[in-house]
Image (tube, helix red, strand yellow):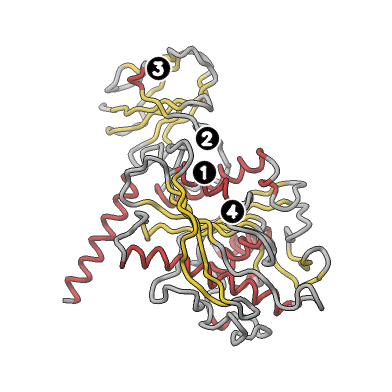
Amino acid sequence: MNRIFTLAILFSSFVAVNSCFAQCDGLRFATFAFPGEPVITSNIVYGNNVRFNGTAEPLELDIYQPLNDTASLRPLVIVAHGGSFIGGSRTGSDVVPMCKDFARLGYVAASIEYRIGMSNFPFPGPGQSDATEAVLRAVQDAKAAIRYFRKDVAENGNTYKIDTANIFMAGVSAGGFVALQLAYLDQESEIPTYVNMNNTGLGGGLQGLSGNLGYSSKVKAIINVAGAIGDTSWIKPGDIPVYSLHGTNDGTVPFNTAVITLAGIFPIMTVNGSNSVHIRANNVGITNCFEIEEGADHVPHVSSAAYYDTLINGSRDFLLHFMCDVPLNCSSNPILPATGNNIKKLSEGLINVFPNPVSTEFTITNKGQTRNCTVQVFDALGKIVFSQLMQSYSLTIETGSFTNGIYHLQLSDGYTVVSEKLVVTH
């Protein structure tokens, strides 16, 4: 009986892994392959708990699914909002655009509400124990949200078609704290001694009592936007990979290691910002990318389209490494096509590729008479094997370094992507 059950699990894992790699066609996860407004399901209750003051609170999330997506298994990105643990919302401008663009890339995204509020705020003023307990309540809730989806897969037939082998956590500001603590504060012995886990709303230890117990709350990697961690020694060899973005002039959450001040009034405690996280990750060999925004203040992606593009591009490249087994790329290359535009096929007559199948070289002729296009060729696993700017109306590409097989050719001017299969036979 146990042997049969084990074989069933192994077979399910095999199917999940191969389904993900099958989706790495150079479009999904690499481009906005699902343009338009995602399918949004709101106000889903994923758990419940009590706040610091004993008030009962249902915990809700909103789900963003790719439009017209037929895949049976999709990776999931759970996103936590900012607000200093005293405000913020799952519908805030710091997280909603991210969720929509994750969906356009081919992920399912979930924006979560978590318990906010802090003892002794605003008067007489919170201390380090009050603030740390607020962080831990939010981490407990995030873990319940992760477990919610695994429980749905196991007990409800996988309502949202989630690949539980590929769940990621992202967070902005306070949400960045949540993502970092969720990833690295993973031992009960690491809980600071000044925190009383018997206080209201903190029962259940690091896993908490917010719901869906009995399922794993592990994630594959995290995205941290302008967050910080209480102690970098929690980050150990073999821990979860991290992508971070932080402004060097952040006046809310320190870029380095410094005292954080709540609401610009209450000095709380020393925390370790993204630069300190990056240094520690490098020192212990944790896979990581760090986007340093020189001169930028707190969460610059909210008010600047350029910073937002950098965040989404960098997150795309970071996640693509785990989804498609491509080399890690921390350069934040632009995502093509631009949001809301269509992917077109060669059969629509915009370009010609000849010969196809190809032996030694092929030529692209742009019949749309558009120059300055980016040409990329992806192998079957989604790895870029060729990339070049096409500055004239035609380009000849040699295939001597290509192995025999099926590739995906992509041509984009930043507004429209043309994509089709390319067959190489030497």
Circle 3 residue:
351
Task: For marks 3 and 2, give the CA distance.
Answer: 22 Å
Residue 101: image tag: 1
Q: Are marks 1 and 2 in contact (CB under 8 Å)?
A: yes
Residue 144 x, y percent position in the rendering: 47, 70
The vertical placement of 331 against 289, above or below, is above
Residue 220 x, y percent position in the rendering: 45, 60
Residue 339: image tag: 2
Three-letter amino acid code at the position of disc 3:
Ile
Task: For marks 4 and 2, give the CA distance.
Answer: 20 Å
Q: What quarter of the picture does the N terminus occupy?
A: bottom left
Circle 4 residue:
91
Residue drawn at point x = 74 percent, y = 65 percent: 257
Three-letter amino acid code at the position of disc 2:
Thr
Q: Disc 4 or disc 3, which is closer to the eye?
A: 4
Q: What quarter of the picture does the C terminus occupy?
A: top left
